[in-house]
Image (spheres, coloured by chain):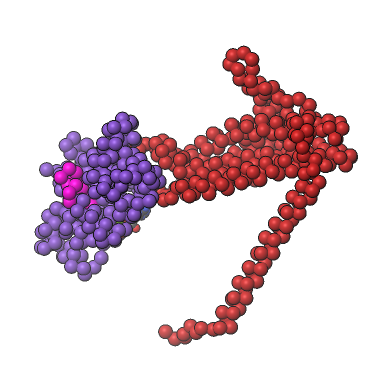
Chain colours: A red, B purple
Amino acid sequence: MGERVVFDRKELSRRQLKDYIFAIMSLLALGFGLITLLLLIIDLASTGLGRIDYAFMTNFPSRMPEKAGILSAWVGSLCVMFTTALAAIPLGIAAGVYLEEYAPKNWITAIIELNIVNLAGIPSITFGLMALSIFVYKFGFGQSILTAGLTLGLLVLPIIIVTTREALRTIPSTIREAAFAMGASRWQVIQHHLLPYSTGGILTGVIISLSRAIGETAPLITIGALTFIAFLPTSPFTEEFPFVTIQWIKDPFTVLPIQMFNWVSRPQEEFHVNAAAAGVILLTLTLLLNGAAIYIRASFRRKIKW
Amino acid sequence: MVKAEVKNLNFSYGEKQVLKNVSMPIYDNKITALIGPSGCGKTTLLRCFNRMHDLYKGAKYDGQILLHPDEVNILARDIDPMEVRMRIGMVFQKPNPFPKSIYENVVYGLKVRGIKRRSFLQERCEQSLQAAGLWGEVKDRLNSGAQMLSGGQQQRLCIARALAVEPELLLLDEPTSALDPISTSHIEDLIVDLKKTVTIVIVTHNLHQAARVSDRTAFMYLGDLIEFDETSKMFTTPSDKRTENYITGRFG
Ligand SMILES: Nc1ncnc2c1ncn2[C@@H]1O[C@H](COP(=O)(O)OP(=O)(O)OP(=O)(O)O)[C@@H](O)[C@H]1O
Ligand SMILES: [Mg+2]
């Protein structure tokens, strides 16, 4: 042992200073992001909030801005989201479970995994182009709620797959081993343990993906969603047996962001106010969805401890 | 009477051979202790008995473990690991109850086997918790979460869970290493008590524990089974120098 390590106060204060500078810079960056977002929301709300009333929610779009409403848009958004969820949730969860629990760890699996991650980064309009040629023309689904739901379903599928896998991965292997050691089959382990314990994480992914889908515009315009719809989809309830129908899935539709897009592209100032009001509704929906995701995650985390 | 027989068992993780031609008998209604320095392959050997290695890639083994009375080779490729695990129970080093209620934990093995009759499940739940010495402490809160229990209680719950399906053989991997002395002595008493009904193989680092509870002891070193004998003989007059060094604390 030759040289001794001595305590150097100067060196210490240098490191403390660096720490301090870094903290300030992070705070500034965070503040910048938050303030921009806040200004955006305030701007939108101050323009649009006053326009929202009962009539605005229950009127169809119109040539006269003061009579125009978002009824067909929000009903359309709801129907499309429902179809998206129906398509993407079972597929996404099943694919995630397969990749995490069943797939052999070889290069084919590795390529599939890589592509799923890449898929999440593909510009959404590409999904629109693909849907146009496959769903609209090849399958003949038309410019319908079904086409839109499937398109957005594909778009958010990677999110659901990835969050499902992450949720499964947080379950300790000791729990899996405990279940297998009791003589459980792989499916029993999944059904009795892995899915229940990862419900919080999976639901969070599902909600996040829906809140992404609800704001998507480009792929829906690409498949030819109409921008002016003055009627509602077919009611799901009928007079005669079996009293429900899925006819609505074949109907043309519009959604909130497309309605907004339509209004902002008009010259009259009053339509811009309408667009802002629809924006407030859309933003509120998105925030509510995200809030629900946070709540669900927190409550599941409290319930399940290892 | 022999309950199981390990014959020429070789095991490797990838290229690394961890068990070298291990052969030993497991006597019926007796407690067999596996001892040896860290990394000698005790856990690996124990996990061969319930085919736990089949869950992971890269584990290779050959040889036999014959389970009596039917003399089925539980390592055979055509034997489903599920079948083996239904006959052979295991308690792990770290307590690993499911994040479910105490009741659901205990009856889980029965649920896996498709048994649904409520009265039977409840009866078996009580019996198993009694056998694991936990009944008195939890009988008023069977429906509360298993995570509320202390470490020692959780480990006894895991023992109850394994006992509920009446295994022919019970594997214990350092079941007390995460526990305080009082919980440890609880569980030791329990283990001795259990051998009336079930054959036990226990891995332990605690030589006093091996001496206190076991009837036979196997000493392993670097993947070899060095010595296997009656515990009393092993701890007084070991025949191998390495065994003697280990039990007198000169290495390991
Ligand atoms: N999953 C694994 N992959 C590769 N090598 C492993 C794996 N598990 C264990 N080993 C190696 O196998 C050898 C035996 O390990 P094992 O866990 O059976 O030892 P042990 O006797 O139980 O030790 P301890 O007393 O510390 O628990 C060790 O050298 C270890 O490094
Ligand atoms: Mg071990």
Residue located 46% across and 47% down the image: A303
Tell which of B161 and B22 is nearer to you.
B161
Tell which of B5 and A27 is nearer to you.
A27
Taking the image as shown, residue B132 lies to the left or right of residue A95, namely left
Location of residue A1 with respect to A125 vertically, above or below: below
Q: Quadrant of the C terminus of chain B?
A: bottom left
Residue located 60% across and 34% down the image: A85
Tell which of A265 and B86 is nearer to you.
A265
The magenta region covers B192-202
Residue located 80% across and 40% down the image: A51
Taking the image as shown, residue A95 lies to the left or right of residue B244, namely right
Q: Residue furthest right?
A: A267
Residue A58 visible somewhere in the drawing: yes
Residue located 60% across and 78% down the image: A14
Taking the image as shown, residue A108 lies to the left or right of residue A57, namely left
Residue A252 magenta: no
Residue A140: x and y in percent read 68, 23
Q: Quadrant of residue A289?
A: top right
Residue A293: x and y in percent read 58, 45
Q: Quadrant of the N terminus of chain B?
A: top left
Residue B5 visible somewhere in the drawing: no
Residue A182: x and y in percent read 32, 41
Tell which of A286 and B73 is nearer to you.
A286
Q: Quadrant of residue B238?
A: bottom left
Residue B5: x and y in percent read 18, 44
Quadrant observed for ligand 1 in the rendered image: bottom left
